[in-house]
Image: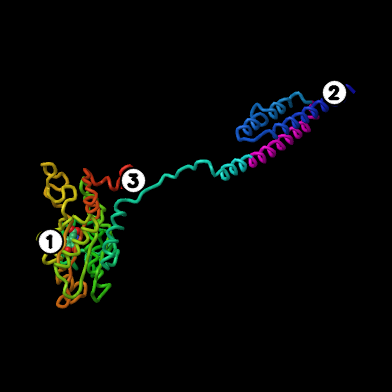
């Protein structure tokens, strides 16, 4: 009798405290409107020293026969609370999101904006100038055969001129016809490819591409860019070359810039020249405030090489050199861009360092 009475009393007390906890929780649940409040209430009920655990710890005082029922009831309540809290969390989250999306007056989070790399700017600008003259913009392989980079350009295997174009060789089975596979050391490799593609002049090509040579110091990077102009037709002369380079210089650098050509030697052109453009910093005088211009030292900046296409090159491209003549030039894109901006970089490797503080200035 005593035992039964004790059990009954315990049972009633226990059920009362469960009910009390439930209604207390339900009230607090209604008051939750932020994630912080949600977290506080979760800890209060479900945390290590929260109400549910505290209740579970009293199981040691529960009469043996009632332990099972006690445990099941408390765990049932625990599940109920967990479920209600999860639902509440979703509700709070979606309300916060709604608020974020609908309050259009809130200042947005700005995206970190990149900028176009200066080599890309230069490529676009150069292409624009030459497209006005009716030049086709072409892209020829960066991984190229020796044949197109050298033999077709009048540089047979043992010719010392090849030393000027130190080369990366690709680990690939050489071809009986085309020789070894290399990374193209200049855009001139595209000359005979274009001749073979077009077959019958007129040809007006501008080939802008990456070039590779194994050099790494303050004024060289192993990957750089060149642009190559090629014009082949009947009656083409040096005057056309000079006129085109002049036009380019005025369009790209500014109307007051001049160009000049100096005799030089290249295997693939005859005659050959080096091309200079007047310095924009000292206006071609070589002097600023009575001292030598630091950018050019002489009034002129070297753009690159040019010349009349050698008959052997025309022949390698399948073009009759008795009928047609042509000119070509090859200039470095990085150098050309720096001349435009009057930039005198101590170390040109900064161009490819990926340092945004440098790049975003252009
Ligand atoms: N390919 C030469 C170089 O990389 C530049 C060059 C010189 C290109 C004379 C030409 C040319 O088309 O006619 O140094």
Q: Is residue 121 above or below residue 350?
A: below
* Mark 1 Cβ inside 8 Å of ligand 1: yes
- Disc 1 and disc 3: Cα gap in Å? 36 Å
Mark 1 / mark 3, whichever is N-terminal: 1
Q: Is residue 192 above or below residue 54?
A: below
Label 2 sits on residue: 6
> CB atoms at circles 1 and 3 under 8 Å apart?
no
Disc 2, SS:
helix
Q: Is residue 296 magenta?
A: no
Mark 2 crowdedness (10 Å alpha carbons): few <14, some 14-19, many ≥20? few
Residue 301 at x, y percent in the picture? 16, 52
* Mark 2 Cβ inside 8 Å of ligand 1: no
Extreme residue in the left direction: 263
Magenta residues, start to end: 63-91
Mark 1 crowdedness (10 Å alpha carbons): few <14, some 14-19, many ≥20? many
> CB atoms at circles 2 and 3 under 8 Å apart?
no
Extreme residue in the top direction: 2
Task: State the residue in front, 72 or 288.
Answer: 288
Mark 1 or 2: in front is: 1
- Disc 1 and disc 2: Cα gap in Å? 114 Å
Q: Is residue 315 above or below residue 170?
A: below
Label 3 sits on residue: 360
- Residue at x 21%, y 72% (from the top left corner): 317
Secondary structure mostly taken by the magenta-highlighted segment of the chain: helix
């Amino acid at each position: 009798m005593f035992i039964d009475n004790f059990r009954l009393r315990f049972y009633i007390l226990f059920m009362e405290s469960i009910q009390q906890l439930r209604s207390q929780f339900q009230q607090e649940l209604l008051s939750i409107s932020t994630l912080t409040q949600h977290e506080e209430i979760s800890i209060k009920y479900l945390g290590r020293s929260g109400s549910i655990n505290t209740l579970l710890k009293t199981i040691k005082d529960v009469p043996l026969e009632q332990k099972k029922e006690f445990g099941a009831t408390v765990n049932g309540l625990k599940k109920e609370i967990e479920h209600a809290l999860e639902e509440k969390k979703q509700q709070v989250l979606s309300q916060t999101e709604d608020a974020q999306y609908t309050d259009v007056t809130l200042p947005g989070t700005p995206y970190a904006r990149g900028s176009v790399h200066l080599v890309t700017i230069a490529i676009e600008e150069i292409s624009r100038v030459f497209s006005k003259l009716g030049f086709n913009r072409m892209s020829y392989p960066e991984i190229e055969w020796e044949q197109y980079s050298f033999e077709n350009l009048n540089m047979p295997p043992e010719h010392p001129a090849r030393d000027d174009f130190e080369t990366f060789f690709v680990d690939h089975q050489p071809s009986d016809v085309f020789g070894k596979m290399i990374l193209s050391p200049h855009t001139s490799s595209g000359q005979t490819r274009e001749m073979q593609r077009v077959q019958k002049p007129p040809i007006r090509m501008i080939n802008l591409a990456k070039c590779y040579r194994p050099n790494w110091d303050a004024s060289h990077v192993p990957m750089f860019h060149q642009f190559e102009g090629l014009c082949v037709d009947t009656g083409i002369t040096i005057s056309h070359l000079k006129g085109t380079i002049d036009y380019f210089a005025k369009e790209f650098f500014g109307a007051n810039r001049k160009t000049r050509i100096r005799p030089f030697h290249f295997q693939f052109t005859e005659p050959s020249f080096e091309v200079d453009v007047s310095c924009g910093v000292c206006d071609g005088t070589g002097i600023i405030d009575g001292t030598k211009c630091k950018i050019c030292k002489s009034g002129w900046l070297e753009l690159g090489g040019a010349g009349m296409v050698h008959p052997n090159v025309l022949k390698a491209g399948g073009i009759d050199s008795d009928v047609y003549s042509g000119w070509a030039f090859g200039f470095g894109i990085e150098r050309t861009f720096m001349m435009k901006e009057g930039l005198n970089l101590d170390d040109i490797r900064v161009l490819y360092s990926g340092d945004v503080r440098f790049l975003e200035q252009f």
